[in-house]
Amino acid sequence: MRILLIHAESFSYRAIQRAVNEAEPLERDVGGPFNNALVVFTTIESSDNENPEAIVLKAAEDIIDIANKVKASNIVLYPYAHLSSDLAPPSIALKILKLLESELRKRGIEVHRAPFGWYKEFTLKCFGHPLSELSREIRAEAEQRVKVEKKYYILTLDGELVNVKEYRFEENEEEFKALVEKEALGKALETETHGKVYTYLRKFGFEWEPSSDHGHLRYEPHATVMIEAVSAYAWKVANELGIPVFRIRGTNMFNLAIRAVKEHADLYGDRLYELRVSKDRLVLRYAACHQQFSILKDWVLSYKDLPMGMFEIADSYRYEQRGELVLGFRMRRFHMPDLHILTHDLEEAKKICLLVRDKIFEEAKKVNRNYWVILNVTEDFLNSHFEYLVELVKRDGRPALVTVYPAGIYYWVLNVEYNIIDELGRPREIATFQIDIGNAKRFGIKFRDADGSEKYPIIIHTAIIGSIERYIYMLFDTAAMMERKGKTPCIPTWVMPIQVRIIPIAKAHLDYAVKVAKKIIERGFRVDIDDRDESLGKRIREAGIEWIPYIVVIGDREVSTETINVRMRCRGIQKSMKVDELIELLEEEVKGYPRVESSMPLFLSRRPAMPYLREAR
């Protein structure tokens, strides 16, 4: 807030016309004359809404202090938008002006507030003493973020809660030990900066965009296919929980002038990605919560509609520290397949979370991974629902790290993180779910119960496979571990950018190669043809560099017998077969997974040199 204080011998004004659509109604269009008045020309700035009560209290103290010193008979609050270019939205400015007026009246001050949102003419005669013209910039003291006292325990399969410093790790719990030491004991991990996953990601076209803010990726053609395939799969997984799910799309920025948005942002923490547009202060969403909640509050919901889910692949923004950025894992912008499930009450939420938990583990096992779990829990939930936490651990079949928070500081009572330990021994959170008891009320989401009463649902937040990028990170990390064991690194065929590459040995074999390609493409698979004028050996090597699962070589024999010679990367075998046999193999291998189109032309000869298609070294 900025104010210009003028001790006026006399002051009067007259409203001429509206300046903004939100101008308040005029009770009268003239004010004054006010004699011996302290006229406070007042500009409300966008940041004032972060802590309006503190701003108002400090402004009132300064104004009263000056009024007492100059012995003014009254105070005139005069809205004045010309002391700053960083203005608050009109609705916020008027709200804070009214608060300031009320605060001054509470202190026994005679105060008049000129109407907000009008062009006005005024007449002012100023005293000439040293205190007759003063300016102030009002800032609230920075709020000290309360340090959250956390307690750490290990919850065993026997249901015993052990202090984290007293727990004795088994020989097969080295990965769990790494998780506990990092998350609970604050031990820094001594490890390499970049492992094989970093190289793999760049090789497939995941790269930092140097022309953007730090932490933003560009997705080249191969990476684009992978993002699209995993996004489609995330929607399929969300629909396998057995509850109705609605897919939506929304905006990526929300106004902090809206109370619910601001409160949710304050609870989230200090990684907000903010921007200013005109007079508004906006936050880039860090998940799909804002958009889904904004839609849900407008729906007329009955108890018969619950449980139900809402899903969106949300482009999410988190202002991570520059030194914490990790390609494919920790970024400032990523894709979050957010599912929110509305439930009748806490007991129903607990039951559905067991289904979510089972699905999370099922998806990890499909790619040969297992999770180590962190149970973030409020103290009251721990005490009231301890057996439920034991049930979660027993389903996992391994102990969990339990982090206990004071009750009531967040919107959730249970926040579960599912971590892999990556190729370099680092814990990496992939999937998650939360039980949210606060946001339904905060955002005005209600349902009509059987008895006609309105109730607030309990909301489950979950990303079953994790963010799109982190899921892909896990796939490549699995491949890195395969390579460390001397195996051929592979990722599932359904997510591979190119699933089949056809290599005609000579130009005479191209027509048959095209015929084979079209037949495979018709079944929804991604195929390309290496028709370049390069040696057969080089083209086969380069197909291997791209990890093509199936390399089809076509020569005279294949054309004459209407067969194909297939090299199967992950199986390490080579076999002659009919095209239909290859299609059957592909069908079986990608059964239950989505099929998305290729991102590049069919013929390699029509592609420019792309630096991201480099060999992993």
Image: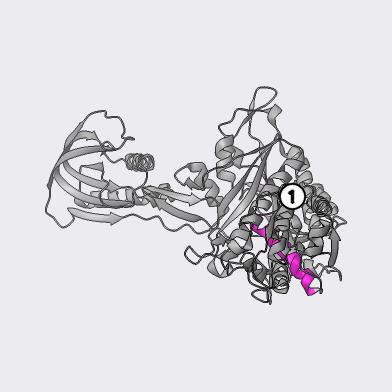
Q: Nearer the viewer, residue 527 or 99?
A: 527
Residue 169 is one of the magenta-drawn residues? no
Q: Does residue 301 appear in the picture of this structure?
A: yes
Crowdedness near tag 1: few (<14), some (14–19) or many (≥20) residues, C-alpha within 10 Å: some
Asked whether, in this view, residue 157 is left or right of residue 43, the answer is right
- Residue visible at 24% across and 41% down in the picture: 76
Which residue is nearer to you in this view: 539 or 208? Answer: 539
Closest to the observer, 375 or 152: 375
Hey, which residue is sitting farthest top in the picture?
452
Q: Nearer the viewer, residue 237 or 421?
A: 237
Give the x, y percent position of residue 92. 39, 42
**Can you give x and y, in whole percent of width and height, for residue 408 in the image?**
63, 48
Residue 141 horizontal/vertical position (percent): 42, 58
Residue on which the image places disc 1: 519
How many callouts does the rendering have? 1
Can you say whether 246 is above or below 572 in the image? above
Rendered residue at 33%/42% (across/down):
97
Q: SS at mark 1?
A: helix
Q: Quadrant of residue 112?
A: top left
Decide if residue 370 is in sight here. Answer: no
Please state which amino acid type lies under the numbered disc 1: Lys
Q: Quadrant of residue 179?
A: bottom right
Up/down of 203 relative to 281, above or below: below
Q: Is 471 covered by the magenta stretch? A: yes
Task: Tell me the chief SS of the magenta region.
Answer: helix
The region drawn magenta spans: 461-484
